[in-house]
């Protein structure tokens, strides 16, 4: 996360959850839950955890909440909280069974660096689940959504007393390509993408770290050993 979004979220921390519910028509937790069902049970990193809103739908998983905005984390009910950036995770390799990230990726400084770090801390076979906002697919849907967010988000910002911050949120929706392109290459394999919300402007994605290959006994190549 760059300095600009960090400053934005530090200023609106106390109003963030309420406004998120308004802007999503009360669906933001439902969209999180649709992603969380794809997470393994075990130790999970909530990357960009913010105020810890996902805590209610994580179930029995052991959660570590990470966010660069200390003002947001201070409001979180999750006991394990770490102030840090996704591009430089302060954890040992193979530390987590899963990583979850909701409404965060458009605010990252470097998605490739973050994916490298997520791959490093995931155990073999572990999953990264991303829920994010963007523009819908299709020219007409994108046009309608762009007009709607240009009107609705600044109005929400005025109501929150933070018009500049919510104009930033509107502009951030155009920052990234669709998830099918964004996650097409990298250290994790893209398994699944789905769309949610009006016009499909919310996406979910599941990425998987490869299982470690088991070397054959005696170090022999299993394909060539018979001949």
Image (cartoon, helix red, strand yellow):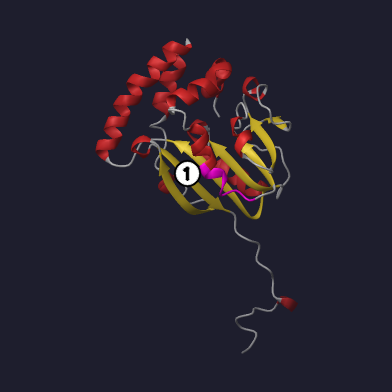
At label 1, counting other C-alpha atoms closer than 10 Å, the crowd grade (few under 14, some 14-19, many 20 or more) is: many
Which element is circle 1 on?
strand
Expressed as whole percent of the image width and height from the top left, the position of residue 155 reads: 38, 15
The N terminus is located in which quarter? top right
Residue 187 among magenta residues: no
Expressed as whole percent of the image width and height from the top left, the position of residue 139 reads: 26, 38
The image quadrant that residue 92 belongs to is top right
Residue stretch rendered in magenta on the structure: 34-40
Report whether residue 154 is seen.
yes
The C terminus is located in which quarter? bottom right
- Report the residue at 61% width, 32% height from top: 49
Q: Is residue 69 left or right of residue 172?
A: right
Expressed as whole percent of the image width and height from the top left, the position of residue 97 reads: 67, 50
In front of the other: 123 or 85: 123
- Report the residue at 71% width, 30% height from top: 81
41 relative to 89, above or below? below
The residue sitting at the bottom extreme is 227
The image quadrant that residue 170 belongs to is top left
Expressed as whole percent of the image width and height from the top left, the position of residue 158 reads: 42, 11
Counting the numbered discs, the total is 1
Residue underneath mark 1: 204
- Report the residue at 44% width, 29% height from top: 24
Q: Is residue 96 left or right of residue 205?
A: right
Report whether residue 187 is seen.
no
């Amino acid at each position: 996360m760059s300095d600009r979004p960090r400053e934005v979220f530090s200023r609106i921390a106390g109003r963030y959850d309420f406004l998120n519910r308004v802007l999503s028509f009360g669906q933001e937790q439902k969209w999180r839950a649709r992603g969380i069902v794809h997470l393994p049970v075990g130790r999970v990193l909530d990357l960009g955890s913010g105020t810890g809103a996902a805590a209610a739908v994580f179930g029995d998983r052991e959660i570590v909440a990470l966010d660069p905005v200390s003002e947001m984390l201070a409001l979180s009910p999750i006991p394990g909280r770490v102030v840090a950036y996704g591009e430089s995770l302060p954890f040992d390799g193979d530390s987590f069974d899963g990583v979850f990230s909701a409404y965060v990726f458009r605010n990252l400084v470097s998605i490739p660096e973050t994916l490298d770090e997520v791959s490093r801390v995931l155990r073999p076979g572990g999953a990264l689940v991303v829920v994010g906002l963007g523009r819908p697919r299709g020219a007409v849907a994108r046009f309608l959504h762009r007009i709607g967010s240009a009107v609705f988000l600044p109005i929400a910002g005025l109501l929150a007393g933070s018009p500049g911050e919510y104009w930033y949120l509107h502009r951030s929706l155009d920052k990234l390509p669709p998830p099918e392109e964004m996650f097409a290459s990298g250290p994790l394999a893209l398994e699944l993408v789905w769309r949610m919300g009006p016009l499909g402007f919310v996406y979910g994605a599941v990425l998987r770290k490869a299982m470690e290959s088991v070397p054959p006994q005696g170090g022999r190549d299993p394909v060539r050993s018979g001949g």
